[in-house]
Image: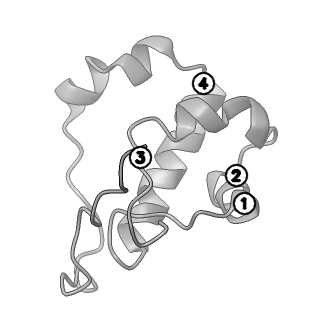
Amino acid sequence: MTEPIAPLVGVEIDLEGFPGFILDVEHLLASELVALATPDELSAALMLWCRAYQQKPHGSLPNDERVLAAFSKAKNWKKVRDMALRGFVLCSDGR
């Protein structure tokens, strides 16, 4: 089993004054997520991206199923979970 990787964004990075992030539309439209996801899965993924942007460290999410379900706004978290979390990795800080 491999060791978890270090957080992808350092805690010293502060994006507090930035209200949003740039969405590369071409990259998104060409992604496997858009190709494979249901509308509910895609919606949950987008909600999690927005929450991850606001977290500390930025770009991370808590490793708590109840919080993730609430953040995703999904009606059936268990059904959309795997696709909504596509691309997220568990790091050494537990996020």
> Looking at the image, do the residues carrying marks 2 and 1 touch, with CB atoms under 8 Å apart?
yes
Looking at the rendered structure, the kind of residue marked 4 is Pro
Q: Nearer the viewer, mark 4 or mark 1?
A: 1
Mark 1: few, some, or many residues within 10 Å (few <14, many ≥20)? some
Sequence-wise, the earlier of marks 4 and 1 is 4
Q: Is residue 72 above or below residue 39?
A: below
Q: Which residue is mark 3?
A: 88
The residue located at (59%, 42%) in the rendering is 44
Task: Identify the mark nearer the N-term, 4 or 2.
Answer: 4
Q: CA distance from mark 4 to mark 1?
A: 17 Å
Q: Residue at x 42, y 12 (%)?
A: 35
Q: Earlier in the sequence, mark 4 or mark 3?
A: 4
Mark nearer the N terminus (3 vs 1): 1
Which of labels 3 and 1 is toward the front?
3
Q: Nearer the viewer, mark 2 or mark 3?
A: 3
56 or 37, which lies in front?
56
**88 to the left or right of 47:** left
Q: Among all residues in the image, which is located at the extreme front?
A: 1
> Secondary structure under badge 2?
loop
Q: CA distance from mark 2 to mark 3?
A: 18 Å
> Which residue position holds label 1?
70
Indicate which disc residue 73 carries: 2
C-alpha separation, residue under disc 3 versus residue under disc 1: 17 Å
